Amino acid sequence: MAQRDLNNRTLESMLPKTLGEYLLDCLKQEGLTEIFGVPGDYNFSLLDAIERYAGIRFINGRNELNSGYAADAYARIRGLSALITTFGVGELSACNAVAGARSEHVPVIHIVGSPPDAAQKQHKLMHHTLMDGNYDVFRKMYEHITAYTAVLTPENAMLEIPHAIRTAKEKKQPVYLVVADDLVAKPVVMRQEASLEKTVSNPNALQTAVDRINRMLMQAQSAILLVDVKTMRFHWEQYVRKLAESLNLPVVSTLYGKSAFDESHPLFMGMYGGAFGRQDVRSLVENADCVIAAGFIEADTNTANFTAKLDPLRLIDIQPSKVKAGLAEYPNVMAEDLLLALQNIGWTRPGTPTKGPGPYDAITGNPDELLQAASYYPRFQRMLKEGDIVIAETGTFYFGMSQVSLPKNTIFMGQGGWQSIGYATPAAYGACIAAPSRRILLFTGDGSLQLTAQEISSMLHYGCKPIIFVLNNDGYTIEKYLNVKTKNQTYNNIPNWSYTKLAEAFGGEAFAVAVRTNQELDDAISRAEKECASKMCIIELMAADPMDAPDYMHNMRYYLEQQQKLKQ
């Protein structure tokens, strides 16, 4: 009997894998243990394959957009993620999240189940289509927001799937795979996978770049290291830290790059926010004779509406596969190789960098005073612990939390560039699934939460226990700050929800409380730190002044008002 079982297992191992099994094998090999998505009749065979598969589970979201946001957050933490939707209606619902992943350099594998292959070949008019017999239209749409697209078949699966995954990992961008529902269970045609050659630096270009950078540093009286978001996406954190330590460089991050460098490190000086951020950090950066920038993105919100002053002649701009030192550009230089080589150039910045006080280092506000940004951000900073994952929604909380000092090994997550309102709540859901042993703190506004509140239901269903702060400031305060042309816009008003009752409405249990004073917030935080071990926590902050905001936003508003006056 035992021999018969052994023979059966041997025979099964010799049988060709189905397309679905092979796809899941490839994803599992990359360390994925979950796939996000929403069921639809054209992806049933994919979901059935997952249910039979050991080691990967399907995580069901309330809609495809939210599942895409959750997959985005999962990939930021785990390095890669997967999303399954159905054809047409499902994939178009998710395309905003996938485009955001493209903008934010996040590798998501988007897998779409499409109508049966025979129906497609006969150009039958199937549901979830444009009723024109064209089954390639949505893939062509995705060509513009992904790094690679492919139509999977049993004949090409062993070539296309590894290539798509490699593209996502190397470019840190989403890719798109579509497979007909009736092909998922077909055996793949065995093919030799293409050999994967590691991309390496051109040694001459690398050495020339190092020599050029060495000369720039030798001529500099002061230098600084600017760390941006690609440091996190391309996993340069250790290279950057060792470079800072070997050269004794003070370090600042950008808005997008927050948490790319350990903010508890003695060399970390703060976040550089151009004219909107801390003036001591701004002076440090803009007076430096040489700025080494790791993965810098010169976007509007990352440079405080382009008020950041970075002299191109003094800038060393390190990108994934090239570097620009002053006016000289060196292609085919891999960032990892350059960062490693620069550790040993023999130059060291003299003196000991001195870190100034952070804006939220001191607790302010009397216990009975009503909540204000100046008093609740220091309390948030005080409650953070090593290893936390902090997710801040686009808007007031994103700019305010960007000024909070983070403990060691803390991940800060937000959509700095894409800035799709509503991202943070499903992102917190994805983070809970990706890192169940870490504490997740979500900071979202009332307006943002109303777009994607359904994923609180998903979090409750899967036993997630984040601490959720909801800033109830009566509408889209960030939009009110950005629009300096008119006042009292009715379109920025929203209905007032009972946010503390959301868990109950979704059939779950949570510690939920609304707070209005500093003492009530202190008590709620203390309680949440205990309750979060067993349940979700929701703390609603009732803003006394709807236009109250952190200094960063006040500075932004003043700048926009001055620019508007110049146009009149």
Image (spheres, rainbow, N blue to C red):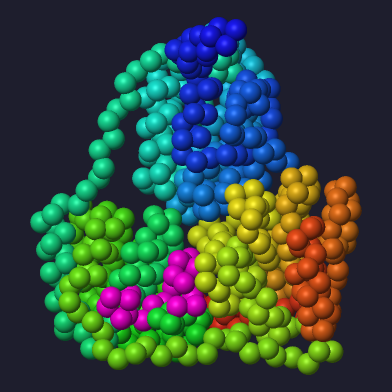
Can residue 382 be seen here? yes
Q: Residue at x 86, y 50 (%)?
A: 508
Task: Give the left or right position of residue 564, taking residue 532 as reference.
Answer: left
Tell me which secondary structure the magenta stretch mostly adopts. loop
Residue 247 sits inside the magenta stretch = yes
Establish if 112 lies above or below 564.
above
Q: Residue at x 51, y 35 (%)?
A: 28
Which of the 4 image quarters holds residue 150? top left
Task: Give the left or right position of residue 436, taking residue 275 as reference.
Answer: right
User: Which percent across, then down, holds residue 192?
Assistant: 31, 21
Q: Residue at x 59, y 18 (%)?
A: 181
Looking at the image, which is closer to me, 45 or 149? Answer: 45
Task: Give the left or right position of residue 386, taking residue 441 as reference.
Answer: left
Q: How many marks?
A: 0
Task: Give the left or right position of residue 299, taking residue 404 as reference.
Answer: left
Residue 418 sits inside the magenta stretch = no
User: Which percent across, then down, holds residue 190?
Assistant: 38, 15
Looking at the image, which is closer to me, 458 or 180? Answer: 458
Question: In which quadrant is the N terminus drawn?
Answer: top right
Establish if 371 lies above or below 386.
below
User: Which residues, given as a range, are shown in magenta?
Assistant: 244-265
Q: Residue at x 67, y 39 (%)?
A: 59
Can residue 137 be seen here? no
